[in-house]
């Protein structure tokens, strides 16, 4: 009987492995597959990153030709600097990051990294140069270790643990009975928004890219988590060219340039103080957020049961 059991058990394990791998593939393809028209050109060369300067030159874009989304967006992020994009929901902020990663091609204008048009370089080299911390990180149905190491699958265990420590995940992991071997994803432990974003930060740290795109989570994190994530962002973006898609203005106060997007157009631009001075759209958003924060910090009287 045992002779029969061992192969059957083995088959069960193989089946589970294949099923997990398929789920990973589905997610990867659902998420990372570019539209079919995005292909490497016949003469595509690897991107050569020297300084890591990013430039959007009069970029216009439409997902559907009948509905333009971005209009003549023009800005650059000098090597190692940080540009933040703010604006109402649907203004086109995340679309900018999708274009930089070349999930889509621009309709007009061009995007350059160190003077190379991103349509003329291989997609693999482009994506290797950019670390993405998305709004909502997809976790694979696998261990926490696997999910972090995914940033650079050839990384050694020490490097993975160091990245987790730098993203402030180590204390959280230390309290899990199975530690790094804890299963996460749909069939495992559900991580909070903040914890997921830290996994994405740890992945980005492992990848160690010259360019970083941080798409801030729209879902509100508690203020302690938010502060911690902002501090981590400040640290990992040091000496990297960074594009921040921000929903909370406290994230952008230290940016070298802030772009205010409205209806796919840049309507104001400058540093935080300059924009407050301008007393326009940004100043209005700032006042509203400050007021909301004050109200959240001092809620009205609540009934206490004796
Ligand atoms: P939020 O702050 O809510 O994240 P956003 O400023 O990042 O918003 P985008 O996600 O860039 O906005 O979306 C800009 C516009 O493009 C929206 O009107 C949205 O409906 C549209 N859009 C986004 N993705 C697609 C898509 N894949 N196909 C068609 N339209 C899309």
Image (cartoon, rainbow, N blue to C red):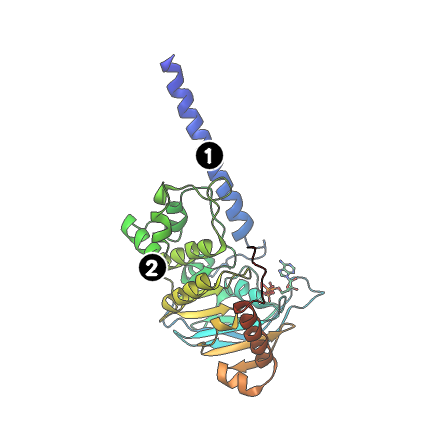
Residue furthest out toward the top: 1
Query: Residue 18 got which mark?
Result: 1
- Give coordinates of residue 221: x percent, y percent: 50, 60
Residue furthest out toward the right: 66
Q: Is residue 78 above or below residue 177?
A: below
Describe the element under mark 1 as helix, strand or loop.
Answer: helix
Q: Is residue 113 visible?
A: yes
Q: Are marks 2 and 1 in contact (CB under 8 Å)?
A: no
Q: Is residue 17 above or below residue 35?
A: above
Is the residue marked by circle 1 packed among few (<14), some (14-19), or many (20+) residues within 10 Å?
few
Q: Nearer the viewer, residue 264 or 121?
A: 264
Identify the residue shown where x is 41% and y is 48%. 147
> Along the horizontal axis of the image, is 148 left or right of 272?
left
Identify the residue shown where x is 40% and y is 15%. 4
Residue under label 2: 166
Query: Residue 54 got which mark?
Result: none
> Along the horizontal axis of the image, is 40 left or right of 49?
right
Residue 45 in which image quadrant: bottom left
Q: Nearer the viewer, mark 2 or mark 1?
A: 2
- Give coordinates of residue 8: x percent, y percent: 42, 21
- Give coordinates of residue 278: x percent, y percent: 57, 87
Residue furthest out toward the front: 306
Residue 143 in which image quadrant: top left
The CA span between labels 2 and 1 is 32 Å
Q: Is residue 73 visible?
A: no
Is the residue marked by circle 2 packed among few (<14), some (14-19), or many (20+) residues within 10 Å?
some
- Taking the image in four quarters, ligand 1 sits in the one at bottom right
């Amino acid at each position: 009987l045992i002779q029969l059991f061992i192969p059957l058990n083995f088959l069960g394990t193989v089946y589970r492995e294949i099923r997990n791998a398929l789920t990973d593939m589905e997610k990867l393809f659902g998420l990372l597959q570019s539209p079919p028209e995005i292909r490497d050109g016949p003469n595509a060369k690897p991107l050569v990153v020297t300084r890591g300067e990013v430039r959007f030159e009069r970029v216009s874009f439409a997902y559907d030709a009948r509905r333009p989304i971005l209009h003549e967006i023009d800005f650059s992020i000098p090597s190692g600097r940080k540009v933040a994009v703010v604006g109402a929901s649907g203004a086109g902020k995340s679309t900018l990051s999708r274009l930089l990663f070349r999930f889509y091609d621009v309709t007009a204008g061009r995007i350059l990294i160190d003077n190379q048009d991103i349509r003329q370089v291989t997609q693999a080299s482009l994506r290797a140069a950019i670390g993405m911390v998305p709004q909502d990180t997809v976790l694979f149905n696998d261990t926490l270790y696997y999910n972090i190491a995914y940033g650079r699958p050839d990384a050694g265990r020490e490097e993975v643990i160091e990245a987790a420590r730098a993203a402030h995940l180590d204390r959280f992991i230390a309290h899990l009975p199975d530690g790094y071997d804890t299963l996460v994803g749909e069939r495992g432990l559900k991580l909070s928004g903040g914890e997921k974003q830290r996994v994405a930060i740890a992945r980005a740290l492992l990848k160690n890219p010259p360019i970083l795109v941080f798409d801030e989570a729209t879902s509100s994190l508690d203020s302690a988590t938010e502060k911690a994530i902002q501090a981590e962002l400040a640290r990992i973006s040091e000496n990297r060219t960074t594009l921040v898609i921000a929903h909370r203005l406290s994230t952008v106060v230290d940016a070298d340039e802030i772009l205010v997007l409205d209806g796919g157009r840049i309507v104001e631009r400058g540093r935080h103080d300059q924009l407050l001075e301008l007393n326009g759209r940004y100043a209005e958003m700032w006042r509203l957020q400050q007021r909301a924060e004050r109200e959240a910090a001092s809620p009205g009287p609540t009934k206490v049961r004796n």
